[in-house]
Amino acid sequence: MGVVPYIARGEGPPVVLIHGLGGFKEAWGALPGALAAAGRRVHAVDLPGSGAAPRPRRGTVSSRGHARGLAPWIDDLGPVGIVAHSLGAQVALMLAAERPGGVSSLALLAPVVVPGVRRVPRSVTDLLSVPVAGPLLAHAAIAPARRRHERCRASILGAAGDPSRLRPGSREALLLEEAAARLRHADLRAMTTWASSGLRAGALPAAATVTTPTLVVVGERDRLTPPADIDRLARVLGGPRILRLPGVGHFPHIEACGPTLDAVVAHIGASVDREPAA
């Protein structure tokens, strides 16, 4: 992975923020400030193929590849708390599984970690789960659509539980607009490759070995993380704390900023009083 592109703020024990598919290091809204105000040193990263990170080499774009790339940097930081969103939760779980002494706490926001493959694909997400040809078919389906800003905007806002709840001109609304704008110029090959491998493999084997204290935050209207998937993850993790947010979709830190930030700050902050798992 080389040098990890990141932005940092605050002082204190380190926290690393790992974005999901189509994410970027500036996309966390008020969360970095809240963690910094609580006495944490916050590092928000760009994964390869996203934000300011360089175009990745072929064969390295997967949750496992991202975890391997981040691992030396995480080790240099010392024991860290990790907050991860969507597919980034797979990266976080793999890091926690492979270096339990280096990860003091996990907060997984709308985690996409349970594999799911339909026999008959009905959407681009289903196509991404198809082995071998899936990424190519999804790439062909997405490429024309993202040439138009309104299509990108509809794709991003469609993942929210109720976009009308976002106040026009607010930081949260502007972040989703920026995500839509960036989608038009994102590394589509890297996105489809990561999504395809992540949706097919999931991260339940890694989750089964994680002993790190974990918080899961999920919106009850999140179509990408259905209740059955969250229940399955909870069983594998052995009873994490779960915060379920009514009316919220795939962006709990944006759509329900207050309760999400309160829960994450409390959970990550509590790790200061714990010893990392041996």
Image: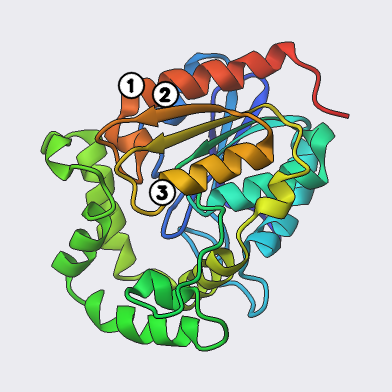
On screen, residue 152 above or below 219: below
Name which residue type carries label 2: Leu
Give SS at disc 1. Answer: helix
For marks 2 and 3, give the CA distance. Answer: 22 Å
Crowding at label 3, few (<14), some or many (≥20) Cα neighbours within 10 Å? Answer: some
Q: Position of residue 73 (x, y in %)?
A: 74, 46
Residue at image coords 31%, 55%: 179
On screen, residue 228 above or below 268: below
In this view, the residue farthest toward the top is 273
Name which residue type carries label 3: Pro
Looking at the rendered structure, which numbered label has been put on residue 226?
A: 3
Q: Position of residue 277 (x, y in %)?
A: 82, 28
Residue 169 visible in this rendered orientation of the protein: no
Q: Which residue is mark 2?
A: 261
Mark 2–mark 3 CB contact (< 8 Å): no
Residue at image coords 59%, 43%: 233
Q: Which residue is mark 1?
A: 258
Mark 1–mark 2 CB contact (< 8 Å): yes
On screen, residue 88 above or below 252: below
Give SS at disc 2. Answer: helix
Q: Quadrant of residue 69?
A: bottom right
In this view, the residue farthest toward the right is 278
Mark 2 vs mark 3: in front: 3
Q: Position of residue 115 (x, y in %)?
A: 56, 62
Q: Nearer the viewer, residue 25 or 164?
A: 164
Q: Nearer the viewer, residue 1 or 213?
A: 213
How many marks overall?
3
Residue 271 vs residue 215: left or right? right
For marks 3 and 1, give the CA distance. Answer: 22 Å
On screen, residue 6 above or below 103: below
Between discs 3 and 1, the one toward the N terminus: 3
